[in-house]
Amino acid sequence: MVEYEPIPIFEAMQLLLNRSNSIDGFFDAMALRYPANLEEYKEYRAMLKPLKKALLKSVSVDEATLNVLFSPLVEEKHGNNQPDSVPPIASIIIGNISNYINLDEANFFDVLRANPEWIFESILRCVYDCITDDALAAESRKDPENESELLRLILKSELPVSAKMRLIELTLSPIEYIDMLEKTVMPVASVFSSMRDRWEPLVELYRRSYANITDAKEIVCDRYKYVPENAEKFTIYPSVMMYNSFNFSTDFPIPNAAGGFVGVLFDVFWSSAGLTSFNDSEISRILSIVGDRVRFEIIEHLVKGPSYGRELTKLLNLTPGAVSRHLSILAGTGLVVANADGKKIYYSLDREHMKEFLSMLNHIFLPDMK
């Protein structure tokens, strides 16, 4: 199913999670890569900047509260055995993106308060991503029998002390944090709903992109090459504040269901980037990504066959979070694709895309060779 109305709580969350990201910086970079689209990008920029500014003015809490809820628990680091960027408290509270889709906005936070075990599951996922010891990682994949077990896993993780303390506070006082998040998010969501005239033209671009498509599976699997196994029912929603991204999940309470959000400009950028055919700027971008030592090693492993995250974690001696970040970046090149098998995500090379990429490299660097 293809939905055409944004979800205000999701929009408020995306605004606050990305409040420091520069719209100007993004479009300046896009204009340098694709100068032919400069005027088009100016139009999109002119729509997004006033909207973001107005929504940020509606934030009613202080900066300290915003930092507690929306700053990453661990800033991005590089190097073996270092925890990578860990989701902020706000994302841990919400849990899987399926909650945005399945929960009614009117009682969204009441449902979260009634199910604090969902937060414990989110904390477990964070802990799992910051553990390299196999035995302890196996423990973190099981539901703890009580809060004490969860606290023990937090303390034994490789997270820095500050992050551990914040997760311990969340474990012991989940309702207090849910109340804080509700007070922060709902005023912004309300203002977003009232500003339809500002964001409706952007959603209209999304509608045009998928006007002749009724099955979201065609968009997710055929167009964007995300192919989760066993998923039969697909649902996607537009996102205005996540305008340039794609966020999808198979972790749904309904069997064989999957869903997520597509930025209102994502298809525009997907098409202008020429992801199905390589131009010089795209080749340069991909070479800079693959040139990273860790990502190059991942490619080498995937040449031998598909692999899932934990396997790559052992091979590369990195945390699961670090491997996940590198895989996400590689997936953005189109050379690596993800396929879900139950709750495991397997990664493999898109061999046709790789052949086309290598053919273009051969054409550029060895034009005389047939």
Image (cartoon, helix red, strand yellow):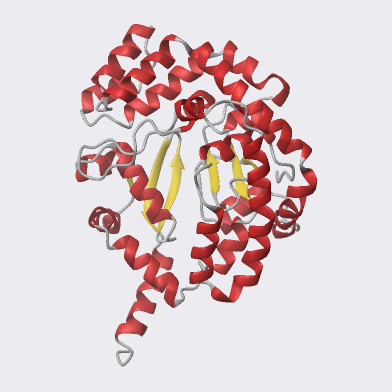
- The quadrant the C terminus occupies is bottom left
Residue 240: in sight, yes or no?
no
Residue 261: in sight, yes or no?
yes
The picture places residue 233, in percent across and down from the top left corner, at 63, 39
- Judge by depth and name the residue closer to the eye, 258 or 27: 27
In the image, residue 225 sits, relative to residue 92, either above or below, namely below
Where is residue 54, by image quadrant? Answer: top right
The picture places residue 291, in percent across and down from the top left corner, at 27, 63
Residue drawn at (55%, 61%) of the image: 27
- Judge by depth and name the residue closer to the eye, 43 or 315: 43
The picture places residue 107, in percent across and down from the top left corner, at 69, 19
Residue drawn at (75%, 36%) of the image: 193
Residue drawn at (26%, 37%) of the image: 319
**Left or right of residue 265: residue 116:** left
**Left or right of residue 182: residue 364:** left
**Left or right of residue 144: residue 91:** right
In the image, residue 58 sits, relative to residue 93, either above or below, namely below
> Total label count?
0
- The quadrant the N terminus occupies is top right
Where is residue 11, by image quadrant? Answer: top right
Where is residue 181, by image quadrant? Answer: top right
The picture places residue 89, in percent across and down from the top left corner, at 46, 26
Residue drawn at (68%, 63%) of the image: 43
In the image, residue 52 sits, relative to residue 337, either above or below, namely above
